[in-house]
């Protein structure tokens, strides 16, 4: 009966998961917004087929509200700039083969100056389309109107139907990275008491290097999550959550770098000891146990960073503290065993010391006190930058908070 239930629910769960992906959400939202903008433009614009409006809506409606606002401003800026360039050229020269080249060059240069970013070609396109018609004034106005309609509809659509928060997607991506790191750490700890082929040690080193690609993917998901928190009316502590996720990824990135160095150290040791175990049985078992605790701590850290509910966060913090305590105890035991082994057989002693130093660095990065200090430091820095960049907005928010607090005390 359970097998039948799993067979039925698995496809449903897959469809639900797919429907929450950014690409699916973006497709549906863009299609709806473009259709609405075209219907509005048919009533307000004098063009028979005002396709500029839905085109603008497609470009403006982004996965996050912050991206929608910034994209809409740049898009309108690009079209208006292109229209003004076209009107200026129409007064002076009209349309010839050489004036077309000049207008394209001028529009692209002006687009760079007004900082429309990815919409620089749109400045030249608008200028060419307007210059290529006989009634330039009417066409210019219609193009600007259609662009404004598309931009306004796109903005209103995202204000009325606020895009979802992508922190969950970023959290899943970060959690997946931590679990891949855990698997690699456990693999590194396997077989330390037996002869390790250099090829196998090198494979683990390559796997550690591939984590850089995973970091890039998590960083992209995190940037999208950070944008979804900006200007979102459903978020009260967007800055705090952004800093928590960003500093968490920074910590995992440092751990991947150290993990790569650790894999390099064991690869070098494997090259030196091709016919014998990397470590004595007692040392290897202790080191494997230590790496197991480190692997668990990495996952617990990711769970703590990506958990928002207070109760779940307390549980995750407790679990991380337990993993770090177990790792610290195992580290001391391993250090004593390695020290005795090096005193008897001092070959490659520097690699043993490097191995412990690398594990210490990972544990230090995951340490809760260091984590709290780094989080407070980043919060102070982000708050200071926000005040310096947007002083009026910060003052307005403070005034509003004071008004709300006074009203609450008065009631």
Image (cartoon, rainbow, N blue to C red):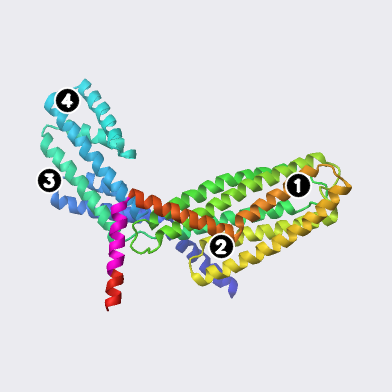
Q: Secondary structure at mark 2?
A: helix
Mark 3 crowd level (few <14, some 14–19, many ≥20, 10 Å Cα): some
Circle nearer the N terminus (3, 4): 3
Residue 193 appears in the rendering: no
Residue with the mark numbered 4: 95
Q: Nearer the viewer, mark 2 or mark 4?
A: 2
Q: Quadrant of the N terminus?
A: bottom right
Mark seen at residue 46: 3
Mark 1 crowd level (few <14, some 14–19, many ≥20, 10 Å Cα): some
Q: Secondary structure at mark 1?
A: helix
Mark seen at residue 353: 1
Mark 2 crowd level (few <14, some 14–19, many ≥20, 10 Å Cα): many
Alpha carbon separation for disc pair 4 and 1? 75 Å
Q: Which residues are magenta?
A: 390-403
Residue with the mark numbered 2: 303
* CB-based contact (under 8 Å), mark 3 and mark 4: no
Q: Nearer the viewer, mark 4 or mark 1?
A: 1
Circle nearer the N terminus (1, 3): 3
- Residue positioned 73% across, 45% down in the render: 354
* CB-based contact (under 8 Å), mark 4 and mark 1: no
The spot of residue 189 in percent (x, y) is 74, 53
């Amino acid at each position: 009966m359970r097998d039948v239930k799993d067979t039925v629910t698995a496809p449903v769960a897959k469809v639900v998961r797919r429907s929450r992906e950014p690409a699916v959400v973006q497709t549906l939202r863009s299609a709806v917004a473009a259709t609405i903008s075209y219907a509005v433009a048919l009533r307000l614009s004098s063009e028979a087929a005002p396709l500029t409006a839905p085109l603008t809506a497609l470009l403006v409606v982004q996965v996050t509200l912050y991206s929608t606002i910034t994209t809409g401003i740049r898009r309108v800026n690009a079209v208006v700039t292109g229209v003004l360039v076209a009107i200026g050229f129409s007064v002076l020269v009209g349309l010839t083969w050489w004036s077309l080249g000049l207008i394209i060059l001028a529009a692209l240069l002006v687009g760079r100056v007004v900082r429309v970013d990815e919409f620089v070609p749109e400045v030249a396109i608008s200028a060419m389309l307007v210059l290529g018609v006989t009634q330039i004034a009417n066409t210019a106005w219609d193009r600007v109107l259609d662009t404004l309609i598309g931009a306004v509809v796109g903005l209103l659509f995202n204000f009325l139907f606020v895009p979802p928060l992508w922190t969950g997607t970023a959290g899943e991506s970060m959690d997946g990275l931590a679990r891949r790191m855990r698997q690699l750490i456990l693999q590194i700890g396997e077989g330390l008491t037996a002869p390790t082929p250099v090829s196998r040690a090198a494979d683990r080193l390559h796997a550690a290097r591939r984590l850089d690609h995973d970091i890039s993917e998590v960083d992209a998901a995190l940037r999208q999550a950070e944008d979804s928190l900006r200007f979102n009316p459903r978020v009260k502590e967007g800055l705090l959550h952004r800093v928590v996720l960003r500093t968490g990824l920074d910590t995992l990135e440092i751990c991947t770098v150290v993990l790569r160095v650790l894999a390099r150290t064991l690869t070098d040791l494997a090259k030196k000891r091709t016919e014998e175990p990397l470590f004595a049985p007692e040392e290897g078992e202790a080191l494997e146990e230590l790496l197991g605790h480190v692997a668990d701590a990495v996952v617990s850290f990711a769970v703590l960073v990506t958990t928002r509910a207070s109760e779940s966060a307390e549980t995750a913090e407790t679990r991380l503290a337990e993993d770090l305590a177990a790792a610290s105890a195992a580290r001391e035991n391993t250090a004593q065993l390695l020290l005795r082994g090096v005193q008897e057989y001092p070959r490659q002693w520097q690699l043993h010391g490097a191995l412990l130093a690398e594990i210490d660095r990972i544990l230090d990065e995951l340490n809760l006190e260091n984590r709290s200090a780094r989080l407070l430091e980043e919060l102070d820095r982000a708050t200071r930058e926000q005040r310096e960049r947007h002083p009026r907005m910060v003052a307005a928010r403070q005034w509003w908070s004071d008004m709300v607090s006074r009203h609450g005390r008065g009631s």
